Amino acid sequence: MTQNSRITVVTGAAGALGQAVVRLLTAQGHRVACLDRDEARLRALFGESGQLIAACDVTSDQSMADTVTALTRGGEHVGVLVHVAGGFEMGEATHALTRESWDRMMNLNAWAFVAVTRAVVPNMLRNGGGKVIAVSAAAAAKGAAQKAAYIASKSALQRLVESLSAEVRAKGIAVNSVAPTTMDTPANRQSLPDADRSAWVGLDSAAQTIAALASPAGDVVHGQHVQLGA
């Protein structure tokens, strides 16, 4: 298999971290497939830069299966999956948590990992291995007020990462996550204007850590959650 037949899939590519990851991996020579929900936004961001573009729903088995089938129709091999897509929201107190809030966070942050890897990992297994890197959260380590559904979903994501790692590491696939504290994004700056940003995680720093896990140096890292930020 030629280097040109290897592709790197980035979900949530239109978001702030997704864009930073796409930029860095492209600069490092990856052939990147940019996945997100909004095709128009993907084209506005990446349409003239040569990356592959695919609009999809990361919570849908069928959407992900169709997307990966289309991306690999010419014999391409998914060498790296960077699963950035996810969601955050403050919620109700735990005793007042609604099923809608629970399902929304679990779908975006936990089930999406299952749907995406269900589509990608078989391609990696057929082609001798690869890398799976998810974006979890430092918050997954313990509970916090009004974040029950979010934290539970990110904790579930970390357990899924560990379980998948145990299942496929002997087959040449390294599965890990990065677990940032608050990301220094335009949206977070707007919503938290008075916050102390000294411990926030910069987008470029997070992208560099992801790129390191995607590199040959990441071959020996398995089932880990690399915490970013204080």
Image (cartoon, rainbow, N blue to C red):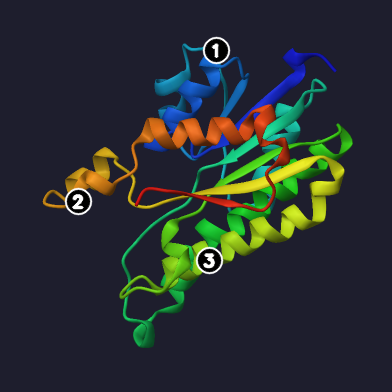
Is residue 44 left or right of 185 when viewed as pictured?
A: right
C-alpha distance separating marks 2 and 3: 24 Å
Please tell me whether mark 1 sits on a helix, a strand or a loop: loop
Residue 125 figure quarter: top right
Q: Secondary structure at mark 2?
A: helix
1 vs 3, front mark:
3
Instruction: Answer with mark 2 or mark 3, whichever residue precedes in sequence.
Output: 3
Residue position marked by numbered label 3 in the rendering: 155
| Residue that appears at 78% across and 23% down | 76
The residue pinned by badge 2 equals 191
The image shows residue 143, relative to residue 20, as above or below, that is: below
Find residue 168 and report its horizontal and vertical position in percent.
81, 50
User: Disc 1 designates what residue?
Assistant: 50
Visible residue check, residue 171: yes
Whether residue 54 is visible to the viewer of this picture, yes or no, is no
* Residue drawn at point x = 16 percent, y = 52 percent: 195
User: Whole-percent x and y of residue 155?
Assistant: 53, 66
Q: What's the residue at 54%, 23% (across, down)?
A: 25
Question: In the image shown, does 103 or 26 lie closer to the viewer?
Answer: 26
- The amino acid beneath tag 3 is Ser
